[in-house]
Amino acid sequence: MKDGPKQSLLDEQANIQIAIDLIELGARLPVVESETCVSRPRLLRLYKEVHGRSPSKGLLPFSTDWFVTWKPSIHSSLFYNLYVKIGKYSPELTKTDTLIKAYRLYHQQIKLSHEPPVLTITRAWIMIRFFESNLLEMKPCSTCSGHFITHAHSPHDEVRCGLCHPPSRAGNKVIKNGEQMTE
Amino acid sequence: MLDESTLNEIQEINLTYLLLAQKIIKSDLPSALVMLNINQDVADMISSLKVGEMMEMSKLNQLICQFRAVSDIHISAILRKDRDQGFNSIHAALVFSSPEASKSLDRVNI
């Protein structure tokens, strides 16, 4: 994707809208940069206009382990099921549009369930890449049939999901501290 | 036999469903397909319905929408939990958006 002279005004406009959508949903700049052809200085300006502060710096989270820990795995699985389903029903959408729509649906549901959104859109974006490079995969839970995230190449065909078989002390931390998990 | 008021409720739900579906489809088609669990052809059909046609389709003694095809065992797995942290609804959302749950429904689109 190049920011060449051929890019039409309409394309540019559409790109900026995607950048705004991603930034509004909380995406880190490297994510926005890789999904749009908007130049970095313009993205910086956009970010400051949307959030009123400079974007955070530093490495993006890069571990696959986070996605299979108890609470993140629940949120990540819900998001990824929605992502796959949107892609299946609307194959004409770009991956970026699918990401945005799936993240909005995820966020909406989490809000209805009165849960803090554990999965950021940046993590969701990284997770899709992990799936594309076969580091993670989805498997059905043997009890509830819901599809859950696991490390790829695990020997079992089915999983016992974290909702049907929660670890014994799961959830206590959040109630005690009253704080939500951070990235 | 159902009494008159229950029959009326069925027709109301039918009409409400069609009006709501049309509204969701018009606001954002790709998300609507997932929320309504219908394919693009059915969505096109619903959004093309005129009010008069919707009324005709609603005047039934049957519901035009049906319960998501998830087995009773799976439903009880979702609702069984004694711990309530808003997880039951997340769990339900997760199961209903999983491939298996929607596969069985593809056959029975309204």
Image (tube, coloured by chain):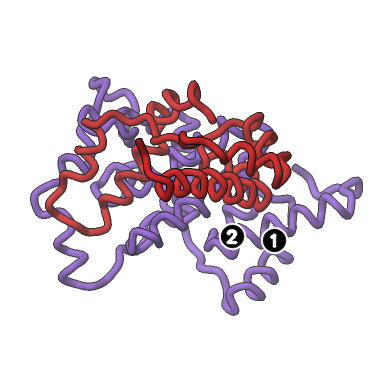
Chain colours: A purple, B red
Disc 1 and disc 2: Cα gap in Å?
Answer: 8 Å
For residue B78, which quarter of the picture? top left
Residue A40, numbered circle: 1
Q: Quadrant of the C terminus of chain B?
A: top right
User: Quick one: SS at disc 1?
Assistant: helix
Q: Chain of mark 1?
A: A
Amino acid type assigned to the residue bearing label 1 in the image: Arg
**Residue A61 image position (x, y, % from top left):** 42, 52
**Residue A180 image position (x, y, % from top left):** 30, 67
Amino acid type assigned to the residue bearing label 2 in the image: Leu
Q: Residue at x 63, y 52 (%)?
A: B23
Q: Quadrant of the N terminus of chain B?
A: top left
**Residue A28 image position (x, y, % from top left):** 54, 60
Residue contact between numbered discs 1 and 2, judged by CB atoms under 8 Å: yes
**Residue B39 image position (x, y, % from top left):** 59, 31
Q: Is residue A66 visible?
A: no
Q: Chain of mark 2?
A: A
For residue A162, which quarter of the picture? top left
Q: Residues within 10 Å of mark 1 (few under 14, many from 20)?
A: few
